[in-house]
Image (cartoon, helix red, strand yellow):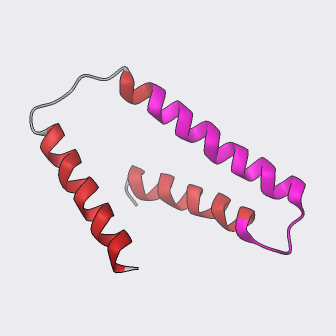
Amino acid sequence: MSDYETIKDAILKLAAVVNNPYNDGFLQFESKKDIWRLKYWIDFKLKQMPEFSGERDWLEELEKSKVWEILKE
């Protein structure tokens, strides 16, 4: 499993805890806080990294695909 898939799997497990109606709010909120911490940490680390050739084009394509997924719903 790639690093991306491992991280994505861990986040999906946290999301499952948050969205499980049988869990109490304390457990759900603690798991959601972990996701928020990860988001802010990733954003912080991305700002410290250099921009690479083709990166903006790749990000634009990623954004377009996100928009199409939203419009399909």
Question: Predominant secondary structure in magenta?
Answer: helix
Answer with the quarter of the image where residue 50 lies. Answer: top left
Image quadrant in which the N terminus is located: bottom left
Let me know if residue 18 is in the magenta part. no
Residue farthest front in this picture: 71
Q: Is residue 48 left or right of residue 42?
A: left
x and y percentages locating residue 61 in the rendered image: 18, 55
Q: Is residue 13 left or right of residue 29?
A: left
Residue farthest bottom in this picture: 73
Task: From the viewer's side, name the closer residue of 69 and 26.
Answer: 69
Let me know if residue 43 is in the magenta part. yes
The correct choice, above or below, for 20 with respect to 41 in the image is below
Residue farthest left in this picture: 53
x and y percentages locating residue 72 in the rendered image: 34, 79
Q: Is residue 41 left or right of residue 30?
A: left
Please name the residue shown 27% across and 54% down the image.
Answer: 63
Please name the residue shown 38% across and 70% down the image.
Answer: 70
Number of numbered discs present? 0
Answer with the quarter of the image where residue 55 lies. Answer: top left
Answer with the quarter of the image where residue 18 lies. Answer: bottom right
The correct choice, above or below, for 68 with respect to 37 in the image is below
Please name the residue shown 64% across and 62% down the image.
Answer: 15
The correct choice, above or below, for 68 with respect to 31 in the image is below
x and y percentages locating residue 31 in the rendered image: 73, 52
x and y percentages locating residue 64 in the rendered image: 23, 59
Q: Is residue 62 left or right of residue 40?
A: left
Image quadrant in which the C terminus is located: bottom left
Please name the residue shown 58% across and 56% down the image.
Answer: 10
Q: Which residues are magenta?
A: 19-44
